[in-house]
Amino acid sequence: MTRYCVNSDGKHAGGLNVCAGCTRRFREALGSIGVDTPALLLIAARQAGTGDTDRTGVRSRSAHAPLLIREQAWELYCETEQLIRLAALQCGCPPATRRTAGIPELVRGILKDDKPLLTAPDAREWWRDITDTARKVNRMVDPPVTRVAFGACPFCEHGVVWGEPRANMGECRTCGAQVNRTYVADRLLDRLAHSEKKGTPKQLSRECARAGIRLPAATIRTWIHQKRLTPDQYGHVTLSSIVPLLRRRAG
């Protein structure tokens, strides 16, 4: 009788309960778990951080992850070890009976013969648990880069251009256009340069934030103290008067 993939993609599964594509993803996920869990354990033990890598390799630098991250990392590590040990027992791997066997060793044993998992009646659950765990571990060890808003998109009406903090190019989430952040900033400053609004440093800071420009109120107060800005009798300055200073700071 022809077997079909338990992931309901309509593909033949051969002698297993998952198709060739799903089998490949399953093995890649297992391999990823074997590679990433040592770093996950280091994060949980406060011996590695979750930020940028250095020249010595993946997260081998001495750093302290925040307490919440460490607790989450330890909980995820324990869950992963339990899952992988059960999988290794299912596959009859000798290391699975040794409490000292680590996750990488257990993964290597499973990959030698993972057929007991992929032919089991609950193959779909094994597949889903392994791939989900691999994704969670990878996200903990290698979190996605924070993205910031550069400003309004010049090519569509309501789009906002987002990108990595230090990147030159960003992408509009509405129309998908690739936009240079300098062009976005120039358009924002041009708009502010024609504004007649005025207010306190705190009010102007909020106004700049609405336009996609981060300008702390403390910076505006410093400019006033340095007499680079001249407030009126109420302590208000015009929005347009700060544009030359913003351009100079950007340059």
Image (cartoon, grey):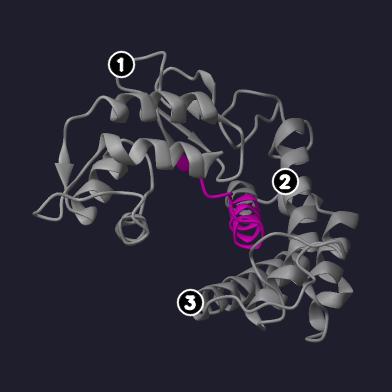
Report the side of 28 relative to 213 (left or right).
right
Residue at 71% in and 74% down? 48
In the rendered image, which quarter is residue 168 located in?
top right
**Which mark is drawn over residue 47?**
none
Q: Is residue 40 magenta?
A: no
Residue at 72% in and 72% down? 85
Pointer 2 and pointer 1: residues touching (CB < 8 Å)? no
Real-space CA distance between mark 2 and mark 1, rounded to the nearest whole angstrom: 43 Å
The mark nearer the N terminus, 2 or 1, is: 2
- Which range of residues does the magenta coloring cover? 131-149
Q: Can residue 119 be seen in this view?
A: no
Give percent across and percent down for residue 123.
64, 49
Q: Can residue 243 be seen in this view?
A: yes
Pointer 3 and pointer 2: residues touching (CB < 8 Å)? no
Give percent across and percent down for residue 54.
79, 62
Quadrant containing the C terminus is top right
Residue at 60% in and 44% down? 166
Instruction: Write down the residue under mark 3.
Output: 68
For mark 1, give the secondary structure.
loop
Q: Does 234 sit above or below residue 107?
A: above
**Which mark is drawn over residue 157?**
1
Between marks 3 and 2 in the image, the one whose residue lies nearer the viewer: 3
Q: Please state which amino acid type lies under the numbered disc 3.
A: Leu
Furthest toward the top, the residue is 155
Instruction: Write down the residue under mark 2.
Output: 26
Q: Please state which amino acid type lies under the numbered disc 1.
A: Glu
For mark 2, give the secondary structure.
helix
Residue at 29% in and 38% down? 241
Real-space CA distance between mark 3 and mark 1, rounded to the nearest whole angstrom: 40 Å
